């Protein structure tokens, strides 16, 4: 029964999913920022449609399909601006084409047919994909050459040749599995330790260390859908720097990473927004480093006359359930920088519920003395469900070999 469930089509997960908000690969980082802030989305899909130019030029290739080649979010922009040359001239950096700052190597975005199985989707994620792009509607119409010409300046690839697309995330798949968790009984009641999904290869930074020293770890955490643990001198967990939280911030966080300690950075990106004294500290240190252009960027983002409650780069209110709005009108659902924890004896289903309830891609694992010993990610959780299909195939192979 569990294996048949894993063979369900991924289109079942797409019901109610909104169409992707796209941006061309040739668009600038500044344009991507504008779309992120206006849409309120944490990620925007990046598309390459080279065949459109071929049609306009009178050549072939009109039947080709646009491809989503990646995604961009505030984490990409923040890490890009943290480079020394970009801190010195952020205005120039923001004119860089989006495709130049996409993560290199294995694609974190993959296309998948709607009739593909849930098992295939899990396999793609285990291979490194974060988002799976799937067609959700087909109008069975082909745009004319005249229409291509009129829309070439800003193509909307999610409605190309009558097809719209959505994407599925690791969180979407884990939530779908949790909704039918009884199918996999008794496995969900097993401890995460017995299932061997605790990853002991953690990324950590000391509370008092410069936040910039964790930049490589933040980039890695973003790729691996995890977080960076902030620890004290005794390696005890204090909090975390989460890409999920950074995704709800604005580009000025690059200045905070370049000037603050890891502990102060946690305060800066917390859901209440940075306090005025931290903003002023960041600006003072930027001036000391002769990075006046970055100070101007901060002044544009935060009104000097605003109170600390309205001058917020990362704003939401989890306790009241109501969202605050930044000065640019971008809503946030970010959570606190407080780390979410569990124990080796915690059950798989308990950890799944905990992660989804807190919108956390990773849960820190503590021992009985409250020492940090590892982390559990959505990818590790999905490996458990994938192993069910592997276990089913093994007896089948053995029976075949006996015959």
Image: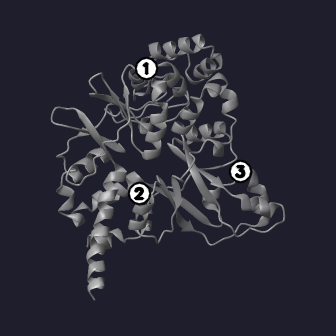
Query: Which of the two marks, 1 or 3, is nearer to us in this view?
Result: 1
The residue tagged 3 is 154
Task: Please indicate, yes or no, whether residue 50 appears anywhere in the rendered image.
Answer: yes
* Secondary structure of residue under mark 1: loop
User: Which mark sits nearer the N-terminus, 1 or 3?
Assistant: 3
Mark whose residue sits in front, 3 or 2: 2
Look at mark 1 in the image and give the residue it sits on: 261
Cα separation between marks 1 and 2: 34 Å
Q: Neighbour class for label 1 at 10 Å: few (<14), some, many (≥20)? A: many
Residue 287 vertical placement versus 22 (above, below): above
**Where the C terminus falls, by quadrant?**
bottom left
Q: The residue tagged with tag 2: helix, strand or loop?
A: helix
Describe residue 280's horizontal placement relative to residue 242 as left or right. right
Write the residue at 34% across / 57% down: 382
Q: Position of residue 378 (x, y in %)?
A: 35, 50
Tell me if residue 248 can be seen: no
Question: Label 3 neighbourhood size at 10 Å, few (<14), some (14-19), many (20+)?
Answer: few
Which residue was labeled with disc 2? 126
How many other residues sit within 10 Å of disc 2, few (<14), some (14-19) or many (≥20)? Answer: some
The quarter holding residue 148 reads bottom right
Q: CA distance from mark 1 to mark 3?
A: 41 Å
């Amino acid at each position: 029964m569990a294996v048949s469930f894993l063979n369900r089509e991924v289109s079942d997960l797409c019901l109610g999913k909104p169409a992707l908000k796209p941006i061309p690969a040739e668009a600038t980082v500044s344009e991507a920022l504008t779309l992120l802030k206006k849409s309120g989305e944490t990620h925007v899909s990046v598309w390459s449609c080279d065949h459109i130019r071929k049609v306009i030029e009178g050549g072939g290739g009109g039947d080709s399909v646009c491809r989503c080649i990646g995604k961009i979010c505030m984490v990409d922009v923040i890490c890009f601006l943290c480079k020394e040359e970009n801190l010195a001239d952020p205005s120039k950096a923001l004119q860089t084409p989006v495709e130049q700052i996409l993560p290199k190597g294995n694609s974190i975005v993959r296309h998948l047919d709607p009739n593909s199985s849930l098992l295939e989707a899990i396999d793609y994620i285990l291979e490194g994909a974060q988002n799976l792009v799937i067609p959700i509607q087909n109008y069975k119409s082909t745009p004319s050459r005249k229409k291509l010409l009129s829309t070439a300046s800003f193509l909307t690839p999610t409605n190309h040749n009558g097809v719209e697309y959505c994407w599925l995330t690791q969180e979407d798949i884990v939530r779908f599995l949790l909704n039918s968790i009884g199918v996999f009984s008794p496995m969900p009641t097993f401890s995460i330790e017995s299932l061997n999904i605790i990853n002991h290869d953690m990324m950590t930074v000391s509370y008092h260390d410069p936040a910039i020293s964790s930049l490589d770890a933040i980039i890695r955490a973003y790729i691996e859908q995890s977080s960076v643990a902030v620890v004290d001198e005794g390696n005890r967990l204090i909090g975390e720097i989460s890409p999920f939280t950074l995704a709800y911030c604005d580009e000025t966080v690059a200045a905070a990473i370049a000037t603050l300690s890891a502990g102060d950075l946690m305060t800066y990106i917390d859901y209440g927004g940075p306090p005025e004294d931290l903003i002023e500290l960041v600006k003072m240190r930027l001036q000391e480093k002769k990075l006046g252009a970055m100070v101007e960027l901060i002044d544009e983002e935060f009104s000097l006359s605003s109170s600390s409650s309205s001058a917020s780069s990362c704003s939401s209110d989890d306790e009241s359930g109501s969202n605050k709005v930044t000065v640019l009108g971008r809503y946030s659902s970010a959570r606190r920088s407080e780390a979410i924890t569990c124990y080796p004896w915690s059950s798989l289903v308990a950890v799944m519920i905990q992660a989804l309830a807190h919108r956390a891609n990773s849960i820190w694992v503590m021992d009985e003395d409250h020492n940090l010993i590892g982390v559990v990610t959505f990818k590790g959780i999905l490996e458990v469900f994938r192993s069910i299909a592997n276990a089913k195939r093994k007896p089948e192979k053995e029976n075949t070999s006996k015959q």
